[in-house]
Image (cartoon, grey):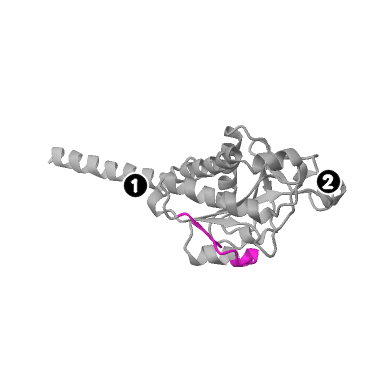
């Protein structure tokens, strides 16, 4: 009788610890639905790079590479929210992710600067503007997201993996000037809080927005247009999701 009791107790403890491990791990990669948003669209393309390229072209190219990297990492349900370029509003993007039952939402953008930091010049007769004052990525989460703590954890994971790739973040969003003043909540990972981002606060799941770099900076635009930098960023996002799924959350 005692032997049977001990065997039953051992089995129950095994089930308990396996269950706890599963809960801590948080997900099964093959089942995790990751919504990737390529910010802006063909008709409302966002910022204009130093050489005159629309931000959306950077966004859709990088977002596609991130979906591919996630699929290669074992997340086949990663998908683009707006693959057809319908110029959805930020809230409509969040609603699409909600309707798809997404477990995570990551919005991909490329950064600019405030007007006072720009220099105007002519490029083969075309007027251009650039700002070489700032360079680097930044990650945002919204405190208004229904899962704000998990959104912050996701943003931190992305930022940490960007740093692991050897990339620096930009601090200009914390500047005490109109249009900025975003609280820098993680000085190591480059994570800011920005409650007004509708694509983040409208999402029912943990959500983060990655500004992959500053396209109005001439040198950084060249890097961001290159395969190496795009693959660095795609790897960073994929590893962040791998860590999220493994329960390795800050």
Q: Could you tell me residue 216's position as x and y percent?
A: 76, 46
Question: Label 1 crowding class (10 Å Cα cut-off): few <14, some 14-19, many 20+?
Answer: few
Residue at the (37%, 46%) spot, across then down: 22
Q: Could you tell me residue 26's position as x and y percent?
A: 43, 48
Q: Relative to residue 10, is residue 41 depicted above or below?
A: below
Q: Could you tell me residue 229's position as x and y percent?
A: 60, 39
Q: CA distance from mark 1 to mark 2?
A: 48 Å
What's drawn in magenta, residue-wise?
78-92
Q: Which mark is residue 176?
A: 2
Between 44 and 153, the residue placed more toward the observer is 44
Q: Are marks 1 and 2 in contact (CB under 8 Å)?
A: no
Q: Quadrant of the C terminus?
A: top right
Residue 28 appearing in the image: no
Farthest residue, direction front: 124
Q: Is residue 73 left or right of residue 35?
A: left
Give residue 161's quadrant in the image: top right
Give the label, 1 or 2, closer to the camera: 2
Residue 127 appearing in the image: yes
Q: Is residue 109 left or right of residue 75?
A: right
Prevailing SS of the magenta stretch: loop
Q: Could you tell me residue 148's position as x and y percent?
A: 59, 53
Q: Is residue 104 left or right of residue 197?
A: left
Question: Label 2 crowding class (10 Å Cα cut-off): few <14, some 14-19, many 20+?
Answer: few
Q: Is residue 204 left or right of residue 74?
A: right
Residue 102 covered by magenta stretch:
no
| Mark 1 element type | helix
Q: Which mark is residue 89?
A: none
- Which residue position is annotated with label 1? 19
Residue at the (67%, 58%) spot, across then down: 197
Residue at the (71%, 52%) spot, across then down: 53
């Amino acid at each position: 009788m005692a032997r049977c009791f001990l065997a039953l107790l051992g089995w129950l403890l095994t089930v308990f610890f396996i269950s706890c491990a599963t809960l801590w791990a948080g997900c099964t990669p093959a089942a995790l639905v990751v919504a990737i948003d390529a910010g802006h669209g063909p008709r409302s393309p966002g910022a204009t790079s130093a050489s005159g390229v629309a931000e959306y072209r950077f966004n859709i190219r990088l977002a596609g590479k991130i979906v591919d990297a996630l699929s290669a990492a074992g997340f086949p349900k990663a998908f683009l929210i707006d693959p057809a370029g319908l110029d959805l509003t930020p809230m409509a993007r969040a609603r699409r992710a909600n309707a798809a039952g997404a477990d995570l939402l990551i919005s991909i953008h490329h950064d600019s600067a405030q007007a006072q930091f720009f220099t105007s010049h002519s490029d083969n007769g075309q007027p251009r503007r650039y700002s070489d004052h700032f360079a680097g990525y930044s990650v945002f989460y919204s405190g208004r997201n229904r899962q704000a703590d998990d959104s912050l954890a996701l943003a931190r994971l992305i930022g940490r993996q960007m740093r692991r790739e050897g990339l620096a973040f930009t601090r200009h969003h914390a500047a005490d000037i109109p249009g900025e003043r975003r609280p820098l909540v993680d000085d190591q990972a480059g994570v800011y809080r920005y409650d007004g981002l509708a694509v983040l606060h409208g999402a029912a799941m943990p959500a983060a927005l990655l500004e992959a770099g500053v396209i109005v900076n001439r040198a950084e635009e060249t890097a961001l247009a290159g395969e190496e930098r795009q693959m660095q960023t795609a790897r960073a996002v994929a590893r962040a999701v791998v860590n999220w799924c493994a329960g390795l959350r800050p």
